[in-house]
Amino acid sequence: MRCTRDALVAASVVSTMFACAPASDDAEPTAQDSDRDTQPALAGPRPLFQLPFPCSQQWLAQTYSGHKPNTNSIDLTKAGGGSSGQPIIAASGGLVVRARFESGGGNFVRIDHGNGWQTRYLHMISTPVVREGQQVSQGQLLGHVGSTGDSGAPHLHFEEIQDGTTVRSAFNGQLVTVDVSRPQTLTSFNCGGGGGGGAEDGPGLGIGRDPSEEFDLDGDGRADVCGRGSAGIYCALSSGSDFGPTSLWIAAFSDAGGWSAGPELYSTIRFPDVNGDHRADVCGRGSAGIYCGLGTGSSFGAATLWLPEFSDAGSWSAGPQYYGTIDFPDVNGDGKADVCGRGGPGIYCALSSGSGFAPTTLWRAEFSDAGGWNAGPEYYSTIRFPDVNGDGKADVCGRGGPGVYCALSSGSSFAPAALWLSEFTDAAGWNSGAGYYSTMRFPDINGDGKADICARGASGIRCALSSGTSFAPTALWLSEFTDAGGWNDTPAYYSTIAFADLDGDHRADLCGRGAPGIYCALSSGTRFSSTSLWVASFADTGGWNLGPQYYATIRLTDVNGDGKADVCGRGSPGIYCASSSGSSFGSASVWTSDFSDAGGWAATPAYYGTIRLP
């Protein structure tokens, strides 16, 4: 029978039999698309495809007898309904070989990923936003869910194609179990870093300086810029008005060394100060453990294995619920960044000696798989290491079903986790989408030296102040950045919400990228002022919404050393920055024409996803 919209929505909220099968839904597109069967034989390894929807969304995958071209094709409807108009993003980077309308598939896109692998996306609501011959990166917007062509209700027909044959799909390295009469609910880890969220920026992706990267490369108080290219780590120093020449600071962490193989490797690269000299170093999780190279102010020294733990053999590559939580906080307050991450049994940490990390120990048995913290990014990706009691030692906090749990650091372990806030709960809907839980951060919004907590809810920004032993009840600090204002529509908006001190008063303020540009609101210590458009750059009209290769690189950091956070991001021509006056940002200009699309930095999150401003 032919599906109605209501039938498909009903199908999306049950996990029993396939509710309906569109009659000839996805009859092969006409002969114009038949050249997909002429791809080279003997395909190479499958790319690390991700679900073609924004990070953390959940979609019901189904198939049925007679599904064309075979039952490995899957139809995807949004869990809970509301499929129509949802953004469709690239499952992996590649070349767009078809972007057009044809009678069977309607508006559709086909991407060639090389080595005999392709993907197809059918029934888009309108003309695809990409063009034939265009290179796209993983997570880049292709179009929106619709019901064009031979389709009876809004959904996405998706295929992974090997040597011209549609094969069983795999997302984030896991084959789906979808079969006739056996649907499967899938969660997207298409988070702008090529794989799941975690304690990195992301998505997830919230902008703002990583707390573990508080020192710049040469110790002059001006944030610099670094990123991982194919040959290793490239960096450029800030002069206060632009970035100087970009050079290869270290040839480790390269493609040849395997660091482009997956997000379990490249997405863990950070620039903490692990030896306490107030210069940023570089560290990342390789298959054998944690590698670090010390900064000299003009380059990084040789990368060595600082810790043979957090390794593939220890299962840290098994999913973003593990590798995505790795961070470099200073948990004992000695001025040297340490390393922590969430494993199956709980939170492991290892202290830095300045030349290596001590063996890891289990600092806290909460936040464990047994406690449900691996169940979804709505839990594990919220884990952070803020200093919530102001003693100079990083603590650990995360959002569980009943609210926000925190555990204080003694310098050698974390105390038992306690429920610091019985808000931001599952019951209140904070697990229902990345537009809510992924915006949770721990800024110091009243300037008392203790990290507080803020997050974007449907009605705006809610915050709660820390007393050092708990969080006070939340209050609505700002009735903007709301669902009604469109901030929940796409990660191009909600994932850019960040907190930094814009006016130099030691209180974290608030910014986010909306369609017209960057909006900001200053903190008074008890609320945020009304937002205003601080800079009209970084706007949708400038293409900053077209993919995470642009919007996910936006950061708030002090590039001129005046104590006020500025704004920078990677656009097609290179890195743009705009300096803060304390009440607005100046005009954005290209501070360096390196890190550009022409230089290949948009090709994959293995490159653009590693750009930081330490």
Image (cartoon, grey):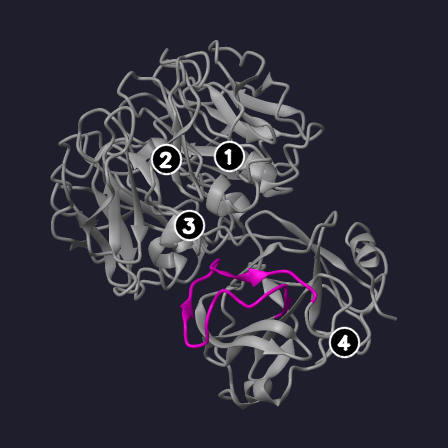
- Give amino acid for label 2: Gly
On the picture, is 341 further left or further right than 24? left
Q: Quadrant of the N terminus?
A: bottom right
* Distance of label 3 from label 4 (alpha carbons): 38 Å
- Residue found 53% across the figure and 90% down from its top: 38
Looking at the image, residue 215 lies above or below residue 292:
above
Which secondary structure, mark 1? loop
* Distance of label 1 from label 2 (alpha carbons): 11 Å
Which of the 4 image quarters holds residue 277? top left
Q: Which residues are magenta?
A: 122-147
Lower sequence index among marks 2 and 4? 4
Numbered mark located on residue 30 in the image = none
- Give amino acid for label 1: Thr
Numbered mark located on residue 540 in the image = 3
Callout count: 4
- Give amino acid for label 3: Asp
Residue tagged by mark 2?
208
* Distance of label 3 from label 1 (alpha carbons): 20 Å
For the residues labelled 1 and 2, say whether their Cβ atoms are less than 8 Å apart.
no
